[in-house]
Image (spheres, rainbow, N blue to C red):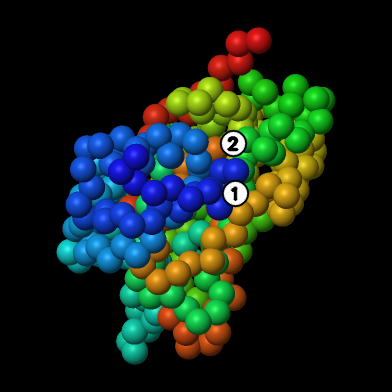
Amino acid sequence: MSIKVNQITDWVAEIIDFDAANMTTEMKQEVEEAFTRNHVLAFRNQTLTPTQLSEFAKKFGPLEIPINRLYIHPECENVLILSNEIRPDGTAVGLVDGGDGWHSDSSHIRIPSKATILQSIKNPDLGGDTLYCNMELVFTALPRATKDLITGRFGVHNVSKILNPRMTVSANRPDAKEFYENAAKTKPSVLQPLVRTHPVTGKSSVYCSPRFTIAIEGMDDNQAQPLLDELFGYIYDERFQYRHIWSDADLVMWDNRCLNHKATGNLAPGDIRRMHRTVLAGDEAYYQSPVR
Ligand SMILES: [Fe+2]
């Protein structure tokens, strides 16, 4: 092995003594193998420029262009700035409310994301952790009747918080109300399978989230909303979670095909958190009955 992989949990590992800016073909293959065995990889001590971050991410596949053009890094259109910093003129340096509800990145578009690579640029003194929920473990834990009820059904996903009674529009983000009102009119809902098959491992996971899933196709809300609440209850269960407490210069790569995640916030007033995000494009989500 030319990379060092330390298991943190059964499905989370850290990669140490690694330089993302100088990854060889052999190292990339080992990272991909580690990413098949784990859903979250934390590369320690990475100081990449936005362009280097984009180049590293592109080695694992094509990237998504962020839909929110306001907060793209000026040096690289593939990198989105996440930050709570507000300039003296009232404008935001980056996306203030990124990740403030449990979700899987880009499930609101037809071809959702494969993975996200997030780089810590400025860590706050307190708070700013990221929570991950292993949706394969959630699927395994469901009662048989619930598995049968959701398998083969589709969730309705939409990016607009205006259409989602479980979400509130952040008052801290200057353009949020306008953005989500516009999105409600211009970004149509998409259908995603409620049970998703991982295209590499073949494992089943629950694929829905409080942030983006607003209904179940062909199911009356009287039945669908309590069912979604039941599913979301598992996401909030710490047994299925991993909390990433960021170290300076962490670069974390996670698998959106079998995880939900959430930014925990809780920063001290005036403390700044800044991250750079790249998102790997994925494949259409599908469900395939496992071979028994
Ligand atoms: Fe996210």
Q: Which residue is drawn at 40% across and 34% down?
A: 33
Whole-percent x and y of residue 124? 47, 78
Q: Position of residue 115 (x, y in %)?
A: 41, 43
- Residue 29 point in image, percent of width and height: 31, 35
Q: What residue type is labelled 1?
A: Thr
Instruction: Of the two numbered discs 2 and 1 on the same chain, state the one appearing first in sequence.
Output: 1
Identify the mark at residue 9; answer none if there is no mark: 1
Q: Is mark 2 on a helix, strand or loop?
A: loop
Label 2 sits on residue: 207
Along the viewing direction, whichever of 138 and 250 lies nearer the viewer: 250
**How far apart are the two marked residues, 2 and 1, measured between alpha carbons?**
22 Å
Q: How crowded is mark 2: few (under 14 residues within 10 Å), some or many (20 or more)?
A: many
Relative to 176, say whether 242 is above or below: above
Left or right relative to 36: residue 53: left
Q: Position of residue 52 (x, y in %)?
A: 20, 57
In the rendered image, is residue 221 in sight?
no
For the residue marked with disc 2, what is the amino acid?
Answer: Tyr
Other residues around mark 1 within 10 Å, as few (<14) / some (14–19) / many (≥20):
few
